[in-house]
Image (cartoon, rainbow, N blue to C red):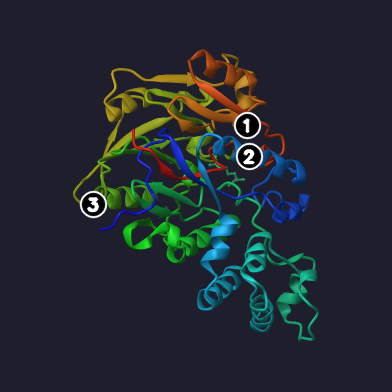
Amino acid sequence: MKEGFLNVTSEIGNLKAVLLHRPGKELERLTPEYLHELLFDDIPWLKKMQKEHDEFARQMEARGTKVYYYEELLAEAIEDQHIRQLFISDVIKNSNIANLQLERIIEEYLQTLKPEAIVEIAIAGLHKTDLPEIERELHLVDHIKKSYPFYINPLPNLYFTRDPGVVIGNGLSINKMKTPARDRETMFLEYIYRYHPLFKKESTPLWYDYKETFSIEGGDVLVLSDSVVAIGCSERTSARGIEILSERLFENSNIKQVLAIHIPFTRAYMHLDTVFTMIDYDKFTIYPGVEGLLKAYQLTPGKTVPKVEPMESLNVALKKALKLPAVDLIQSGGGDEITAAREQWNDSTNTLALAPGRVVTYNRNEASNETLRNHGIEVVEIEGSELVRGRGGPRCMSMPLVREGL
Ligand SMILES: NC(=O)NCCC[C@H](N)C(=O)O
């Protein structure tokens, strides 16, 4: 097999290339009524959010990371007319319009647009008033959904690029999301994988596909080393999904062991990376409020399914998996229970490593950042007052494509 582009064999190796999405018009389509369904807790102020996001990208670029954007790669991927047509019909299929006549009208409308404009609608949604008025029969569904504002729903969570896909080794997992609110995001990644030359599909194995049955979300997957992956079993990632992905990795990659980490199934910790991230060769940060509740299981190749061995503790599991004499589990929140809970809610433990011992975090998590510094970590702070309203931090907002080997 020829050399591919994607390559991630750790959580902390120098970040060479990353996939982001700059928050756009989709955020301005959030209304209080649909917040819950769209997995938000509040309405962000887009202009400020974009500034914060630009600064996040700038901090990475300043340290040599090449930043790619979903919207740009996707528009390039559908440049070809035939692929664009496939994409349009997939977007429509995914939108549950349930009215063939209307589907055809939307399809014809989208066909008149340039790739960038189609991508914008695929991300920001199609408001009913965006569609040119065309004489048509009203179906039952038109009456039933009369007060619903969109034909195509907006995707306000796309800026959390971590979740739809994960690069593990030289391959890609295109994830099966737990909730319909995020389904279409993974389809975008599939188009980029299949049709954008950057991803060098021929040399890039696919570990998982969004059309599978069992959910896996990227915030639960941590590539601990070139031979060990940790996967959170959480509100979003299913036990069976973990087994299936593990089997494929055992059979086709260098991964020899998966650490399944069972975390409480709750909104505040929807993914493993909302309570636990790796920041240096032997250093991790963890939210103390869940530390005692986590259960770790070692998965290794088995006969029909992976062999599962319960581990004594996360600490022991990490030492064993990474062959280290000791690991430092740095508790977030600076030793105060209330501060730790408040800062966890604002993603204090959701750090993104740019290099071993250097992480990006939100500046608002003062106590947690201070603690990291006391443990010798370089903390690059960004403003995140608006970004945080979607309940995610720097790790959630980034999908590493290439990291330097350790
Ligand atoms: N890796 C992460 O924890 N991502 C954060 C995702 C937040 C988004 N609002 C969601 O609920 O899916």
Frontmost residue, 256 versus 338: 256
Q: CA distance from mark 2 to mark 3?
A: 35 Å
The answer to whether 377 is drawn above or below residue 274 in the figure is above
Q: Regarding ligand 1, which quadrant of the image does it lie in?
A: top right
Residue at mark 1: C-beta within 8 A of ligand 1:
no
At 64% from the left edge and 68% from the top edge, which residue is drawn?
118
Does label 2 or label 3 sit earlier along the sequence?
A: 3
1 and 2 marks in contact (CB < 8 Å):
yes
Q: Name which residue type carries label 2.
A: Arg
Can residue 333 be seen at all in this image of the molecule? no
Name the residue tied to disc 2.
391
Name the residue tied to disc 1.
345
At 27% from the left edge and 49% from the top edge, which residue is drawn?
253
Q: Name which residue type carries label 3.
A: Glu
Residue at mark 2: C-beta within 8 A of ligand 1:
yes
Q: For residue 251, which numbered disc appears in the image?
A: 3
Residue 380, position as x, y percentages in the image: 58, 27
At 48% from the left edge and 61% from the top edge, which residue is drawn?
192
User: Which quadrant holds residue 297?
Assistant: top left
Q: Name which residue type carries label 1.
A: Trp
At 67% from the left edge and 49% from the top edge, which residue is drawn?
23
